[in-house]
Every structure is written in C-alpha cells, then in structure tokens.
C-alpha cells in the first residue's frame, strides 16, 4: 500500500502515464515478450514499429489487460494494473482499438458509439433511458461526424465497408473521452486517401491525449508520432524520434530489409 | 410564430407514430385482438386446450428466443426453470389434508406464486452465474446438463416431488372452473412478456446485451462486466419462464419429474426453432404449430387409420423441423419475412422502379 502510494506520487510528479517494468510474456515455450521496459508520459505520441511477430500486439494486450504477463509489472497512472482484468482499464481513461475490427455488428453505428460510452459510466445495467442517455446519444452522433460516418449513423455496423468499419473502430475508442488511446494498426486496409484523413485525425487530437500506436505503414506512424520504439522478437531494439528512426541502419535491416529503403518516408 | 415552436414536437410525435405503425406491429396487434376475441367464436376445446397450451409454451419459448436473439445464448434450461416454479407452486398450495404428495404446505395460491417465482429467479441467478462464462455450444451443453440434473434432483428428492408427482394442484379461485379466464390471462401475460422483451432491446441494458452477443471481448475492454450482464439476462429469462411454469401447473393440475425430463426440454427448443430463434413473435407461432400438430394430426386422412403414437408424432415433428430448417434457418418467422420482402419487391417491380430495397439484402445477412 505504502509503496503503491509512493509510486503514484512519483508518477504524478514525472507526468508518467504508463510504466512497464520488465514485462515477460511466454506462450508455452515461445517467449513473445522478453522483458520489455517502457515509460509513456502524459501527452506522448508513441509509435511501436516492428515486423510481424515482433510482439507489438502482445504488448498492447498486456497493457490493455487482455493478457496477464508471465512476469513484470504494468503500472497505469501509478496504479499497479498487472492483475486487474481488462474491464477496469476504461475507469483509468484507457481506450483501445483492435487490429482485427471488433464491432457490434448487429447494432447501428450510433448504437455502437453509444454503447462505447455506457461501459465506463456504469449506466449499462439501467432499464430506463434518462438524460444521460440523451447526452451519450448526442456525443455518439458528434463522434460519427468526426470519423466521417455522419451519413451512415443508422446503418448496421456489419453492413459498413471495410474502411468505414476501421473508422468506427477508432470512433469507439475516442468517444469514451479517453486520456490514453491505444490504436492497433488503424491504417490497415485503408486506401491512400483514407490513410491521409486518418493522419489528419490523429494530429488533430487534443494535446493532452496520450497516444500509443502500432502501425505497419511507416508514413502514418512516423508522421503521427513524436517518439518511435522499434521491436523485434519480443525486445526493444531501437527508440528515438521519427527522424532518428528514419536513418537508423538497424531499423532498416530488421524492419524493412536492408535494401528496401524507407518507402514513403522520404520527402 | 407559434407554429414553428410546435412543429418539431409534432413532427417527432408523427415520426414516433409511424414507427409504431410498422407492418410488424400491426400484424402483432391484429393477432392479439384475434386471440382476445377467440373465446367468442372458438370451440371450447380449441380455446381451453390448444390455445391455452400455445400461450404457455409461447411464453416459455420466448425466453429461449430472448436469450438467443439478444444475448447469443441458446438455453436448454428454460423448461427446467418453468418446472421449478411448477413444483414450488405444487408443494406450496396443496392442503395438508388433501389426498396428494409433496410438502403440502397449504398456502394461499397467490403467496405460493410469489414464493415459486422467488425460488425460480434465485435458481436462475445461480445457474446463470455458473454458465455465464461460456458461450455457444458450451453454453448449450451446460444448460442441457442443468436440465438433466434438474430432472434427477426432483426425481430423487421425493419429499419435493412426491414419488409419482404432485396431483390436485388447484389454480386460484379466479381461474378455478373458469378456463376461459385463464386463457385470457395468458394472452395478456403473453402480450406483456412480448412488449417487455421488445422494449428491453432498446434500453441501455438491452443494447449492452446485444453488444455482448456481437463482441464480448470489445465489451470487456469498454468496461462492461460481461458475465454479470449475461447472468442478469439469464435470471430475467428464468423469472419469465417461471411465470409460464406457474400457469402450466395450474392448467395441468399436477406435475411430476417426467414432465421436466429431456423430452419436454427438447420440445420447447423445437418450438423455438419452428418459430425462429431470432424472432420473438416466432415463439408463439412455433408453439401454435407444435400444439396444433400434437392435437390435430390424428384427424388427418390416412393418419386416422394407422393412429398416432408418440414416436410417430416425434417423427412427423422431426420432418417438419427439418423442412423448416432447409427452407429457412430463421424458422417460420424467417419464411414470413422472406415472403413479405418478396411481395414488396414484386410491388416495386410492377411500379417499374427497378432496383429492390437495399435493406432487403442487409436483412438476410447472418
């Protein structure tokens, strides 16, 4: 208790939002994460890069509480969340999206965005509608506009196009009014124009919102982030600003293949 | 300038009215009116036997549909829960000096109803809490296990089930010797259950339940307690099944362990499947088809020559279910939906507008 209070106090001082301490995840004999340390500050924009199988999504799932680490600690806002199940994360202001779209496919866009808010509010057991719901509905429609879904608010999520589903996926994370947003490959499967819109959306987020981003599209990742961490085989191999990462030969070698060059990152 | 202030309100109420007057609601309202007027022209046998049983089975099957359509849980424990309510009523109302078995508490029948519903709800909560961590085929298997366990529990705790069952269970004075009243009460209860489930679907609770049906992982990451939600939905369905169970035992006048065995449990699932497990109306439609087949098949030409045994009836119902499943996985309600969409398209074609409605394709998507 005492140490927790001390950690919380020091976290408050340093403005640290998330701390990972020597996180190890092993699936049987396979070590997906081999002792990852990570500190994310308030207002940070951090991108995680790395080839498939590098452990990016596993790291995401550990932070989000979907996977319990084999060892190590996950501290969010100074609170040790290592053992807390995923459903307690929203109370700490954490919101996430999924690499593979996870929507309520039988419900409309508006209902999806509405439900995303009720979980945190504790209103979800209510049998009656109230003024709070009107507020949630309003915010749901406003968010639909933000993620370019204003003209399909009444459409069932399962009937949306792939691009629209990805937009809704992000909208559902943002509509909760989060302090810490984790986006797992938001640009996957999007067209060039849609990716450009996505980058603009990410850049337009409130400066207080902390962003952790997994992205295969280097262009999106390096433009949206202020800080980049490169992972390979469950370990951090490089970190720095986007400019430093652009020229890091090690990153070239493991992530892009030595000859590939930085496609899309050149001016 | 006063009309401008009133116009949005009026437009909204007109929109609400138009939404309430959908084809679906009009058909349901007409069917309800017909059911309420039935005692005026239907034969006693049809009203007091066929339709009364239809309503009881319909309410019980509606709880299966509610859990399946909104919660994504196919439960085989609903008939057991109805049976729990029935046994509780039986034990509570039969008088000490009656020539019957069971606990013979001799309570007031209405107190007995409250007691039965309380016990059933509590049992449903416990069973639901245990099953709520599973989905799909595992949930089905666990609830099937409940049904089997329930049968053996009542079969072996003989003070509760009175060896061969509890007989001489009288309904309250209101319904005693007034089978038509019981039928009308069941129609009213059916409407209440139907409306309650439909309204529930648009409440925060109901929407969250549908969210859990679609993606429990996402719901958990949004802060929802998924298993508590499933448990509460199961408890509500259990309470409703208990209501059906109370009327069932009043109507039968007796209950024994065999009446909640695997046979009737599966019959109730068949009722839900015939009607369509994704449509609430289908529950009563399926119940009617099932009960009508049960009562009238023997009168058909040829069948009346060879007679109909339980095995033969089951064969016919099996073929019927097979046919419906081949024609439409959504049961009779699905077939009706398709005919309705087909007719609408036909009308549109005849008007020469060409393209069919976009929601037609969307509606048939799984």
Image (tube, rainbow, N blue to C red):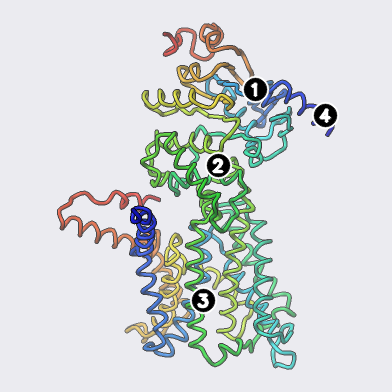
Task: Give the spatial CA distance, label 3 vs label 1.
Answer: 60 Å
What residue appears at the point 64 percent right and 31 percent down from the top-left corner? A63
Report the chain holding disc 3.
B
Which numbered disc covers residue B56? Answer: 3
Q: Are marks 1 and 2 in contact (CB under 8 Å)?
A: no
Q: Which residue is mark 2?
A: B218
Residue A245: name its quadrant.
Answer: top right
What residue appears at the point 40 percent right and 60 percent down from the top-left corner? B330
Looking at the image, is mark 1 or mark 2 nearer the viewer? Answer: 1
Looking at the image, is mark 4 or mark 2 nearer the viewer? Answer: 4
Task: Give the spatial CA distance, label 1 vs label 2.
Answer: 24 Å
Residue B55 place in picture, x, y as percent? 48, 76
Report the chain holding disc 4.
A
Q: Which residue is mark 4?
A: A3
Residue A214 place in picture, x, y as percent? 54, 24
Q: Which residue is mark 1?
A: A40
The number of callouts visible is: 4
Q: Along the line of sight, which residue is nearer the eye, B222 or B263?
A: B222
Badge 2 or badge 3: first in the primary sequence: 3
Q: Are marks 4 and 2 in contact (CB under 8 Å)?
A: no
Q: Are marks 2 and 3 in contact (CB under 8 Å)?
A: no
Task: Give the spatial CA distance, label 4 vs label 3.
Answer: 61 Å
Can the viewer see residue B115? yes
Task: Give the spatial CA distance, label 2 vs label 3.
Answer: 37 Å
Residue B343 place in picture, x, y as percent? 24, 61
**Is B123 on the left or on the right of B291, as rendered?**
right
Looking at the image, is mark 4 or mark 3 nearer the viewer? Answer: 4
Report the chain holding disc 2.
B
């Amino acid at each position: 208790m005492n140490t927790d209070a001390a950690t919380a106090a020091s976290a408050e001082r340093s403005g640290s939002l998330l701390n990972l301490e020597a996180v190890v995840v092993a699936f049987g004999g396979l070590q997906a994460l081999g002792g990852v340390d990570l500190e994310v500050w308030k207002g940070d924009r951090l991108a995680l890069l790395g080839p498939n199988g590098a452990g990016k999504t596993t790291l995401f799932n550990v932070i989000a509480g979907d996977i319990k680490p084999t060892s190590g600690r996950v501290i969010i806002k100074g609170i040790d969340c290592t053992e807390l199940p995923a459903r307690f994360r929203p109370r700490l202001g954490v919101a996430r999206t999924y690499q593979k779209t996870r929507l309520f496919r039988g419900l409309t866009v508006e209902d999806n965005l509405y439900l995303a808010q009720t979980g945190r509010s504790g209103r979800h057991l209510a049998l009656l509608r109230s003024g709070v719901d009107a507020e949630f509905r309003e915010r749901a429609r406003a968010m639909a506009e933000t993620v370019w879904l204003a003209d399909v608010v009444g459409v069932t999520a399962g009937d949306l196009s792939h691009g629209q589903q990805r937009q809704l996926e992000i909208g559902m994370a943002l509509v909760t009014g989060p302090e810490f947003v984790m986006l797992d490959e938001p640009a996957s499967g999007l067209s060039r124009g849609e990716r450009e819109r996505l980058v603009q959306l990410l850049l337009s987020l409130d400066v207080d919102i902390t962003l952790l981003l997994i992205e295969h599209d280097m262009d999106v990742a390096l433009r949206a982030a202020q800080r980049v961490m490169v992972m390979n085989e469950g370990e951090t191999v490089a970190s720095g600003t986007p400019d430093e990462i652009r020229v890091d030969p090690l990153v070239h070698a493991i992530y892009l293949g030595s000859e590939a060059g930085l496609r899309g990152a050149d001016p | 300038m006063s009309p401008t202030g009133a116009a949005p309100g009026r437009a909204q109420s007109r929109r609400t009215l138009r939404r309430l007057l959908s084809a679906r609601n009009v058909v349901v309202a007409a069917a309800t009116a017909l059911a309420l007027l039935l005692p005026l022209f239907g034969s006693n046998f049809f009203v007091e036997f066929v339709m009364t049983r239809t309503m009881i089975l319909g309410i019980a099957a509606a709880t299966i549909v509610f859990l399946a359509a909104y919660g994504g849980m196919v439960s085989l424990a609903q008939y057991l829960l109805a049976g729990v309510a029935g046994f509780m009523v039986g034990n509570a109302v039969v008088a000490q000096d009656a020539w019957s078995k069971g606990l013979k508490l001799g309570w007031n029948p209405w107190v007995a109803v409250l007691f039965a519903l309380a016990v059933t709800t509590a049992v449903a909560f416990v069973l639901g809490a245990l099953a709520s961590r599973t989905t799909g085929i595992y949930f089905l298997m666990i609830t099937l296990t409940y049904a089997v366990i329930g049968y053996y529990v009542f079969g072996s705790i003989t003070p509760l089930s009175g060896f061969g069952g509890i007989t001489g269970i009288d309904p309250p004075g209101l319904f005693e010797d007034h089978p038509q009243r019981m039928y009308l009460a069941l129609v009213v209860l059916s409407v209440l259950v139907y409306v309650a489930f439909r309204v529930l679907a648009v409440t925060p609770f109901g929407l969250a339940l549908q969210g859990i049906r679609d993606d429990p992982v996402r719901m958990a990451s949004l802060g929802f307690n998924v298993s508590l939600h499933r448990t509460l939905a199961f408890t509500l369905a259990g309470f409703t099944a208990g209501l059906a169970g109370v009327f069932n035992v009043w109507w039968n006048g007796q209950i024994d362990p065999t009446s909640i065995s695997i046979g009737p449990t599966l019959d109730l699932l068949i009722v839900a499947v015939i009607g369509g497990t994704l449509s609430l109306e289908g529950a009563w439609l399926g119940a009617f088809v099932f009960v009508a087949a049960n009562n009238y098949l023997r009168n058909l030409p040829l069948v009346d020559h060879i007679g109909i045994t339980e095995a033969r009836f089951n064969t016919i119902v099996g073929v019927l279910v097979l046919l419906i499943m081949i024609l439409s996985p959504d049961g009779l309600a699905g077939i009706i939906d398709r005919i309705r969409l087909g007719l609408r398209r036909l009308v549109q074609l005849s008007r020469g507008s060409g393209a069919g409605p976009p929601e037609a394709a969307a509606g048939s998507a799984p």
